[in-house]
Image (tube, rainbow, N blue to C red):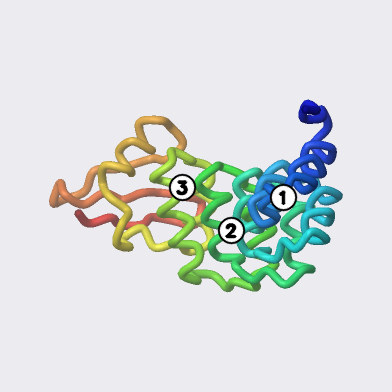
């Protein structure tokens, strides 16, 4: 029995020759790694879940892979932006926001904000706030914000009553009620 080869393409070819390649799984993995040549190879083998690949590319912060997926028809720019926010990939977030043509205050910024604070991506959270992400949206807990504040980068000023906080970013104060 021959051993599995060393290069990524050789491994994929080895799997395909044995009938055990899952093209969409391989596409997602190569998108996260940002290898557009291997992504094209996977598409040639039948991979077609370009939206999944787009979210994986966003998690990996892979701009070229994001653009490749969009050219293939992927449309989940909001989901991809949330994935990028959760991993702290600011440039991928900016690319998704531009490609998705989101206007200030679009729900995509709030979804991305939720992922950012949940995953301790403070710079991504600040970017979402500057784009109009809703700090009072369901799923954005005070606990997540306290964790983000303690990590640094977000300034909190106590208000009256004490349950209210003003969170400041470059665009001004936002109020959070819990």
Helix, strand or loop status at disc 3: helix
| 29 relative position to 67: left or right | left
| 155 relative position to 62: left or right | left
How packed is label 3: few (under 14 Cα within 10 Å), some, or many (20 or more)? many
State the image coordinates of residue 20 (x, y, percent, origin top left): 68, 47
Q: Which residue is mark 2?
A: 80
Q: Which residue is mark 1?
A: 19
Determine the image quadrant of residue 48: bottom right
| 25 relative position to 146: left or right | right
How packed is label 2: few (under 14 Cα within 10 Å), some, or many (20 or more)? many
In the current view of this chain or complex, which residue is farthest to the left? Answer: 161
- Mark 1 or 2, which is nearer the eye? 1
Q: Which residue is mark 3?
A: 116
- Mark 2 or 3, which is nearer the eye? 2
| Alpha carbon separation for disc pair 2 and 3 | 13 Å
How packed is label 1: few (under 14 Cα within 10 Å), some, or many (20 or more)? few
Helix, strand or loop status at disc 2: helix
């Amino acid at each position: 029995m021959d051993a599995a080869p060393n290069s990524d393409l050789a491994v994929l070819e080895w799997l395909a020759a044995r009938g055990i390649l899952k093209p969409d799984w391989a596409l997602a993995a190569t998108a996260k790694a940002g290898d557009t040549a291997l992504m094209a190879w996977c598409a040639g083998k039948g991979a077609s879940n370009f939206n999944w690949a787009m979210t994986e590319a966003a998690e990996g912060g892979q701009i070229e892979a994001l653009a490749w997926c969009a050219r293939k028809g992927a449309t989940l720019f909001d989901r991809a932006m949330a994935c990028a926010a959760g991993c702290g990939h600011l440039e991928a977030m900016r690319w998704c926001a531009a490609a998705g043509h989101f206007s200030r205050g679009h729900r995509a910024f709030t979804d991305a904000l939720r992922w950012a604070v949940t995953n301790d991506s403070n710079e991504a959270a600040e970017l979402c706030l500057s784009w109009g992400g809703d700090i009072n949206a369901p799923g954005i807990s005070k606990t997540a914000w306290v964790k983000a504040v303690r990590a640094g980068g977000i300034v909190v000023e106590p208000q009256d009553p004490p349950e209210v906080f003003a969170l400041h970013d470059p665009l001004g104060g936002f109020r959070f009620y819990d």
